Amino acid sequence: MTATQARPQTLLVASITEPDPPLEAQVQTCLAAGADLVELRVDCIRDEAAVERLLARSTQRRFILTVRSAEEGGHWDASESERIALIERLGLLQPGFIDVELATWLRSANVRQKLALVCQTGGEGAELDAAGPIARPRNRLILSYHDWQQTPADPDAILDRFAPTPAGVIKLAWMAEDACDGLRALELLRRRGGERPLAVLAMGEGGIAARVLAGRFGGYLTYAAARRGAESAPGQPTLAEVIGLYRWGERSPDPDVYGVIGWPVTHSRSPHVHNAALREAGIDAVYVPLPVRPEQEAFRRFIEYVCANDWLGMRGFSVTLPHKEHAWRWLCDRGGRLSPPAAKCRAVNTLTREADGRWSGDNTDGDGAVAALADALGEQGRLAGLRVEVLGAGGAARAVVAALLDRGACVVVTNRTAGRAERLADELGCQTRAWAQRGEGPLDVIVNCTSVGMEPRSDETPLPAQRLAAGMIVLDTVYTPRQTRLLREAAERGCVTVAGTEMFVRQAAAQFRRWHGCGAPLAAMRAALEVSL
Ligand code: NAP
């Protein structure tokens, strides 16, 4: 499939929450970057005069005016009557849209009448118009509902409460505990979006996919922060991320969907690497973070939800901690296909929805490590017969050991917890060495598969520097930071070093080939990873 230039019909709203830089400059930047509308969160900006000046000077009606009440998560701290008076005063300057809570609308006839003076309601305001010649600005009324605690058990019932209102746009926002809650926002949009313009937003990291995919299901609005640190709701991506990272406007509104399942996934670099690859290859797809709570049951719930809702368009997943083994177990229970590396290490880092609708599992970590090592070995690129020590016996170690053995390397495993190393060695068929003796004896290659040296404890190393001998090849699977202490000390001692970033890009490239059936644009993936670190 090739990317089309078709633009999603969903309006992309940039939320402005601070008075500096000057509002005009912020608005210009957001519109120039690709926002369709700009929300002025007057309760956060806390400079009513600046907002008034902006609206008075503006000839465009591309604003959403919001003075959010404290009870619905806003920062308004003066009286309710002052809030309504402010909405009315600023509303007369014709922002375009006015966002008011459903609860506020329902509360009193007096409030409804005041809002009707500045909104297209067809209700009390229309009667006022009929009574006199005063031309009132007719902003569109957004009525909104927020649940900052959880995903409502019955969102349909909440939506039904909007039925008697004159809302031009209905907006529901709820807190998503994980990706499943986020996807329920899309489910509601799909089911009820045809009734009236509807925006359903899932807050928290679990809602990113729903925000990015709103266009696929006819969401009327989706929101982005003007800049990182100025979000109007938790988990809100920035405008730059929605447009750049998640390819808004560059892909069709109906892309294939891929993502990374893990807990946490906030810091995963996979969305950067895969979306860059999709862009470079011109594939109409998007890749999103999917936080799924750490329990096996949560993984099962998520994946079964995806299976039961094919309309989501989800075609493949990267699987990261702590779900690699959960994915393997789920596929085993379902009789799904497992590639030899995945079956061997009993861990799946890649799930693929096949053309017949069934899911299959691979593990590309080992191939990623081997490909990175083969590059460092130069022309012959052969691992057969080389003496390799693997530090660690967790999930990464299992995949790396299996791939090395497959290439004919002589592998010895060492781990802080000896029993774990022994189990791994028994299952995969290699030697073990006591942790105290790691790095001793003649070795050609050392691969660190422990998490030692990873941020924030980047001053640590899994191996005393004096055990590093010139000429050895040292691969550190840790890739945050890019240059670990182990790699720095290895380079100082004349070793050939291979960064975990290279393994990361290679394993992602193997996923890309698996999903899209074409070569992976390695240079673009590498560059995206470098920029993201
Ligand atoms: P895991 O299953 O949790 O295993 C962690 C390993 O680290 C275990 O062997 C553990 O030893 C060891 N360890 C942890 N703290 C230690 C300490 N203070 N001293 C000695 N050993 C310690 O994790 P994993 O999935 O294998 O991941 C391990 C590393 O690989 C992570 O840093 C991850 O980022 C990296 N990784 C990189 C890539 C890539 O593409 N570059 C891909 C996958 C993983 P015990 O058994 O004694 O606890």
Image: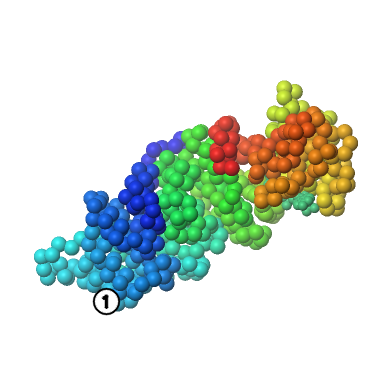
Task: Tell me: residue 114, above or below residue 384.
Answer: below
Does the image show residue 331? no
Of the residues shown, which amino acid type is indicated by label 1? Ala
The image quarter in which residue 480 lies: top right
Q: Badge 1 local density, few (<14 within 10 Å), some, or many (20+)? A: few
Q: Residue at x 37, y 60 (%)?
A: 45
Q: Which residue is mark 1?
A: 109
Figure colour scheme: rainbow
Residue 529, x across and y down, in percent:
58, 39
Extreme residue toward the top, this view: 379
Residue 307, x across and y down, in percent:
56, 54
In this view, the residue in front, 26 or 165, is 26
Q: Residue at x 76, y 35 (%)?
A: 490
In this view, the residue in front, 211 or 469, is 469
The image quarter in which residue 291 lies: bottom right
Q: Residue at x 29, y 70 (%)?
A: 84
Extreme residue toward the left, this view: 133
Residue 8, x across and y down, in percent:
38, 46
In this view, the residue in front, 306 or 426, is 426
Q: Is residue 241 left or right of residue 449?
A: left
Q: Quadrant of the C terminus?
A: top right
Does the image show residue 313? yes
The image quarter in which residue 269 lies: top right
Q: Secondary structure at mark 1?
A: helix
Q: Residue at x 24, y 65 (%)?
A: 89
